[in-house]
Image (cartoon, rainbow, N blue to C red):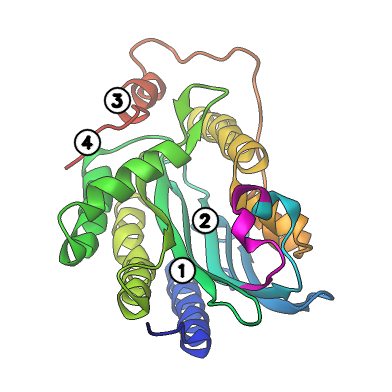
Amino acid sequence: MELPDISRIKQFLLDLQDRICQQIANIDGKSTFEEQVWDRPEGGGGRSRVLRAGAIFEQAGINFSHVSGAQLPGSATAHRPELAGRSYQAMGVSLVIHPLNPYIPTTHANVRFFIAEKHGEAPVWWFGGGFDLTPYYGFDEDVIHWHTVARDLCTPYGEQVYPKYKRWCDDYFYLKHRNEPRGVGGLFFDDLNQPDFATSFQFTQDVGNAFLAAYVPIVTRRQNHTWGERERQFQLYRRGRYVEFNLVWDRGTLFGLQSGGRTESILMSLPPLVRWEYDYSPEPGSEEERLYQHFLVPHKEWI
C-alpha cells in the first residue's frame, strides 16, 4: 500500500493558501492579508493570514498549520483509542470569511491531513475537509450553484459520494441546542484513506481547488446589493450562531486548543462583531423569516 507523501501534501496546502488569499484580496480591492508565522513549542507551527476592514470582507482568515507531537490530547484518543501511544502530525488549511454586506454569505472551508505513527507498526492516516455556506439572506440560485460545484467535483469518485458527504455536512454543522442548521451545508468528509493514498489525496485537492469556484460567483452577484441597518443587525444576530457552533460543537476548535495550537489562529473563525438578542423571532412574512423557513431546513435537497 502506498504510504502518504507528507511533503507533497504540505506543498499543496501552502499553494492552496496562497491562491485563495490572492483571489480574496483581489476581489476586496482595499485591504490585504497580514501574515504571522508562528512556531509551536511542542512541534510544528504555521502561518496565519487575516484580512480586516476590507471593502467587501469585514474579516477573512486563511490559515495553514502543521503541528506535531509525541502524543495526542485526550479528546482525540477517547474517540480513537488505537491512536494512544503514537506520535502524530496534523496539517491543513482552514478558512472562514465574514463579508461586510449581509447579502453575501459567510463561508468556511477546510482541507486537512492527519497521521499517527508508532515504531514497528503501520501508520494510521486520513484526510478530511469540506466547505459550507452560511447565508443571512438567501438566494436559491446561490445555494444551487454552491451545491452544484460540490456535486460535480464528487461525481468522478462515484454517484454516492456527494449525497454521503452532503448529509455528513448537514449533520455536522447542526446546532443541537438550537435544533437548527448553521447554514445551507455543502460537503464534509473525514477519515478518508480509501481506496488508496493517491485517490484520497486527489479528492482532497479537488475539494480545496473547488472552493473559489463555488464561492466567488456568489460574492460577485451580491457585493453591490444595497443594505441598511436592519440587515446589518440581523447579520450580527445570526453571526451569534456561528460563534455558538464553533465554541460548543466544533471538533477542530477543541483539538486545536487542547493540542496547544496558536489560540489567535484557532479563534480567527469568530466574527469581529456579533450580537445576541433574547428570544428573537423574525417578523412574519419578512426576508428574515424566509431564511428560517426556506433555507435553514435540515437535509434539504438543493439539486
Q: Position of residue 71 (x, y in %)?
A: 75, 67
> In this image, 226 relative to 177: left or right?
left
Q: CA distance from mark 1 to mark 3?
A: 29 Å
Residue type highlighted by circle 2: Ile
Q: Is residue 143 above or below residue 59?
A: above
Q: Position of residue 218 (x, y in %)?
A: 31, 53
- In contact (CB < 8 Å): disc 3 and disc 2: no
Residue type highlighted by circle 1: Ile
Density class for disc 2 (Cα within 10 Å; few <14, some 14-19, many ≥20) is many
Where, by quadrant of the figure, is residue 227 drawn?
A: top left
User: What residue is shown with label 3?
Assistant: 294
User: What residue is shown with label 2?
Assistant: 97
Residue type highlighted by circle 4: Glu
User: What residue is shown with label 4?
Assistant: 301
> In this image, 248 relative to 220: left or right?
right
Q: Nearer the viewer, mark 1 or mark 3?
A: 3
**Helix, strand or loop status at disc 4:** loop
Q: Is residue 283 above or below residue 85?
A: above
Labelled disc at residue 24: 1
Magenta stretch, residue numbers: 78-89
Q: Position of residue 208 (x, y in %)?
A: 39, 69
- In contact (CB < 8 Å): disc 4 and disc 2: no
